[in-house]
Image (cartoon, rainbow, N blue to C red):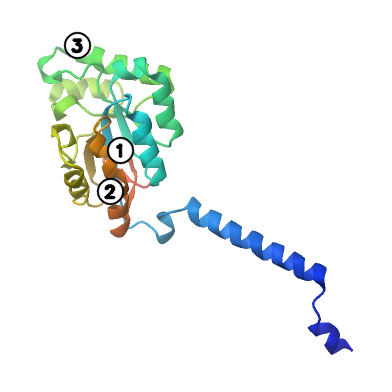
Amino acid sequence: MSGATGRSHHPVTTALTAVTLAAAATLAVQTAHAVPARAAGCNGYVGLTFDDGPSGNTPNLLNALKQNGLRATMFNEGQYAAANPAQVRAQVAAGMWVGNHSYTHPHLTTLSQAQIDSEISRTQQAISAAGGGTPQLFRPPYGETNSTVRTVEAKYGLTQIIWDVDSQDWNGASTDAIVAAAGRLTNGQVILMHDWPANTVAAIPRIAQGLAARGLCAGRISPQTGRAVAP
């Protein structure tokens, strides 16, 4: 009798077991989706950076980054942060980091120290007032810098970030060319891209695929070293 009982399947028990297994399967799927590329581990990190925002294109860029599990550093201009505070908050809400890219994008090396100070300090204030926090990173427009620029950066506790790879998206680069540029990134390196080109947004899914294929993940840029590190 005990053997027969052991082989029988009570309908309630069977139903509960089925529900439990289904719940476990659902949880497993949700967990897998929650940690897309990182489940396999990251062999290195790269810094994706986007200059000149926020703009009318920022929502498209943020959507593309989020959908592909990427985080990036947004080097915002102060004038645009002041005009589009909601987009600065959207950048932060999407998991991005916000850096300072001057207020009006001038050639800083042609300005006086007081003018450089104004460009940097007003941008710190505009980004902070918009909800972007106090930037720790600064990208000089056109990558142009000198000792005076560096002195002002230090005054505001900013680390200067140039780039290792230029995507040339500002110069009309095709989506293929932007993807190829990202393919040259190695561990710790930083790529220059921009907030506004449509080709850049179109390149995001393929950039994500290319990084994953090489075991690289999108990281934050360390204020200590200026290199890409784990978020």
Say if 25 sits above or below 78 in the image: below
Q: Residue 207, labelled with which disc?
A: 2
Quarter of the image with the C terminus is top left
Q: Position of residue 229 (x, y in %)?
A: 33, 46
Q: Which residue is mark 3?
A: 115
Q: Position of residue 173 (x, y in %)?
A: 15, 39
Q: How many marks on residues?
A: 3
Q: Earlier in the sequence, mark 3 or mark 1?
A: 3
Q: Earlier in the sequence, mark 2 or mark 3?
A: 3
Residue 130 in which image quadrant: top left
Q: Position of residue 172 (x, y in %)?
A: 14, 35
- Closer to us: 184 or 43: 184
Residue 198 in which image quadrant: top left
Q: Which residue is mark 1?
A: 224
Q: Amino acid at mark 3?
A: Gln
Quarter of the image with the N terminus is bottom right
Say if 132 sits above or below 209 in the image: above
Q: Residue 15, labelled with which disc?
A: none
Q: Amino acid at mark 2?
A: Ile
Q: Secondary structure at mark 2?
A: helix
Q: Residues within 10 Å of mark 1 (few under 14, many from 20)?
A: few
Q: Amino acid at mark 1?
A: Gln
> Which residue corresponds to the image point at 36% horizontal and 56% vertical from the top-left?
42
Compared across the picture, whether 186 is left or right of 44 comes to left
Mark nearer the viewer, 3 or 1: 3
Q: Is residue 106 visible?
A: yes
Compared across the picture, whether 137 is left or right of 185 comes to right
